[in-house]
Amino acid sequence: MASRICDSVLVTGSNRGIGLELVRQLVDSPTPPVQIFAGCRDPNGQRSQDLQELAQKHRDVITVVQLDTTSPTSIAEASKLVETKLKGKGLNLIINNAGVNIPGSLAETGKQEMVDVYTTNVVGPMLIAKDFHPLLCKAAAQFPHQTSMSCSRSAIINVSTLLSSITTCPENFSVSPMYPYRVSKAALNMLTRCLAEDLKKDGILVMSLHPGWVQTEMGGPKAPLTTAESISGMMKVITSLTEKDTGTLLDWEGKNIPW
């Protein structure tokens, strides 16, 4: 029997696209997590209908959680709900998938666009890590004799992008300027490195993962990857992560992306 990726996982931004497919493939895996917490801003809205239908089909595994990653109050309340549902156990894995993109050249980008995207793509994952830290620590502590890191023990995965890479920017900037998105995701990478160093003492793995250019509402119809293909690759990477991967940026095929 295939080993379980983890006992419990929180996926943010799970009502559509990459987040929804993550929840779908997690629950459909040969040995699914015992508990999947699917966070989304408006659980009862029209855009969450597919998630609600999936949750109804797997009511014993999936819990839909109201989670607006731009709201500290929403994040705090979500952490309390997850803690209650875990019944004394820790949370093994957080996949910070919620993100926004406001495409914009320098001429099109102003203060508000930069602030709005940064708030969602950087501040949100930071607050999630902060509020859920005790539950991640509790999960890591459930393996007192295990010194190695893994997603089955305790981990945070921040969904990043190739466009966050400062090194490769000259290769793709002309095709996708996207000032707010690029800058925010580069900042997310630094958040990943900071958290990786800070939480190493707690046995918590932290890394960034690029899902590829995917056919979603954000990625558009011209993207070369389907959500199913992207998430299938991501799942293999997530399962194979060890302490050597903490603080790194990998793509959905497990290849390293330079900062």
Image (tube, rainbow, N blue to C red):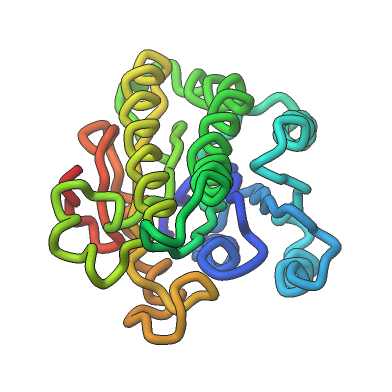
Quadrant of the image containing the N terminus: bottom left
User: What residue occupies the far bottom of the structure in this picture?
Assistant: 222
45 lies above or below 76: below
Quadrant of the image containing the C terminus: top left
Figure quadrant of residue 194: top left
The image position of residue 72, as x and y in percent, is 71, 31
Q: Residue at x 30, y 27 (%)?
A: 148
User: What residue occupies the far front of the structure in this picture?
Assistant: 107
Q: Residue at x 37, y 57 (%)?
A: 106
Task: Compare residues 247 and 239 and report the one nearer the observer.
Answer: 247
201 lies above or below 118: above
Q: Residue at x 72, y 74 (%)?
A: 50
Q: Can see residue 149?
A: yes
The image position of residue 152, as x and y in percent, is 44, 40
The image position of residue 116, as x and y in percent, is 58, 46
241 vs 156, left or right, is left
11 vs 6, left or right, is right
241 vs 169, left or right, is right
Q: Can see residue 234?
A: no
The image position of residue 221, as x and y in percent, is 45, 85
99 lies above or below 69: below
Q: Residue at x 23, y 49 (%)?
A: 165
Number of numbered labels in the structure image = 0
Task: Compare residues 86 and 161 and report the one nearer the observer.
Answer: 161
Task: Compare residues 106 and 187 and report the one nearer the observer.
Answer: 106
User: What residue occupies the far right of the structure in this picture?
Assistant: 44
